[in-house]
Image (cartoon, rainbow, N blue to C red):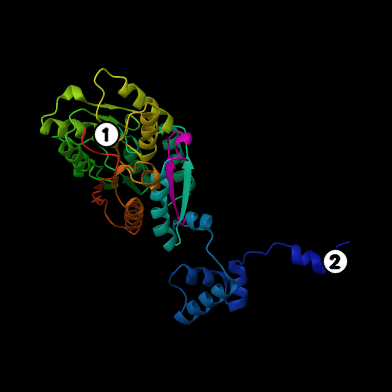
Amino acid sequence: MTSSGEAARRKPARRPTIKDIARRAGVSESAVSFALNDRPGVSQDTRARVRQVAQELGWQANSAARALSGDRAGCAGLVLARPARTLGVESFFLQLVSGIQEVLSAQRTALLFQVVADLDAECALYRRWWAERRVDGVLVVDPRTQDPRPRLLASLGLPAVVVGGLAAPGPAVPEAAAGHPQVSTVWADDSKAMARVLDHLHGLGHRRIAHVAGLPGLAHTERRIRSLRAEAALRGLDEDHVRSVTTDYSDAEGAEATRRILDAAEPPTAIIYDNDVMAVAGASVAAERKIPVPDALSIVAWDDSALCRVTHPRLTALVRDTPGFGRLAARELLAVLDGGPPRTVQGELPHLEARESTGTP
């Protein structure tokens, strides 16, 4: 038989309650509530004594109780509506989340992360989180060209920061203004980033350039496609020799898109890939076809990573501070939660790191 002492040792520790604090401090439970929630009705001495006892007992406010009382839940939400199979190989989101978490954890704010099947499921999740008061606000990623989420979040009154511009740039929609008046936006200038890539390739002598893009319908995919065409036209390149194809960001679709591109009657002398994984997959296709890189084909990755630096030859890539972009988004969300107005904030412009995968055609 188990002794009473052993049973006591095995019993889970009980969380301290307001009643425990009141008993230890020698005050009423209502006085404890007033003191811990910074409400009038108790003296400064009582407030200080209650807080000291709460600290000694290891008391923490219950998130559900805070939600019912109208206070913060201490949690931010992040939903990703992408094919789950593409998440394990792409470093961008891991770096983005690391930056977000760095800022939130310093403010003792949790990050609630969930992957869903599609945009409808994402919107339904926002409605549920709002009804249950599960999160104080959300970070919205992968903005769409026709995006229902900012309007939904504004109608719910759920604070949000969109990570990326909400519309493709154009004469009527400057990229910096592509936002929603009630939702903050942090954005990166994909147009200028694409101009840097084209400057590099055009300067090397490339006139036939392909672009293996990401998911169709994403705002940044459309921005990059439009920017490629515009920058190619500014340099006098034949529009028939500059083309984009969309994929799901995976290595499999990146490789298949590369094969189709190289099978063209006039294959390109350079290919730009929208992430590091597809760029490495494209380099593997070139190797299996015995196409030397960069002598016969130059390769550029949009996002730099360890993959780009350990592949042989090392891949030319756009280098940006992705964790810093995540920190910027998290700080903006905290500012909104503290009562700040919705803003549009620009992130750092990436620079091109030229390596061995690009050369003269």
In three-dimensional space, the C-alpha distance between marks 1 and 2, rounded to whole angstroms, equals 79 Å
* Residue 107 in sight from this viewpoint: no
Residue at point 46%, 79% (across, down): 43
Residue named by callout 1: 295
In front of the other: 345 or 225: 225
Amino acid carrying mark 1 in the image: Asp
> Magenta stretch?
73-89
Say which label, 1 or 2, has the lower sequence index.
2
Viewed as shown, does residue 288 lie left or right of 171? right
The x, y position of residue 212, in whole percent, is: 31, 30
On the rendered image, what quadrant is the N terminus found in? bottom right
> What residue lies at 44% left-to-right and 57% top-to-bottom?
72
Which residue appears farthest toward the top when viewing the image? 265
Q: Looking at the rendering, which quadrant does residue 24 occupy?
A: bottom right
Q: Nearer the viewer, residue 255 or 116?
A: 255
Measuring from the top left, give residue 22's x and y in whole percent. 59, 73
- For label 1, count other residues whose C-alpha is less than 10 Å away and answer few (under 14), some (14-19) or many (20+): few
Q: Position of residue 133 (x, y in %)?
A: 47, 49
| Label annotation for residue 3 | 2
Secondary-structure class at tag 2: loop
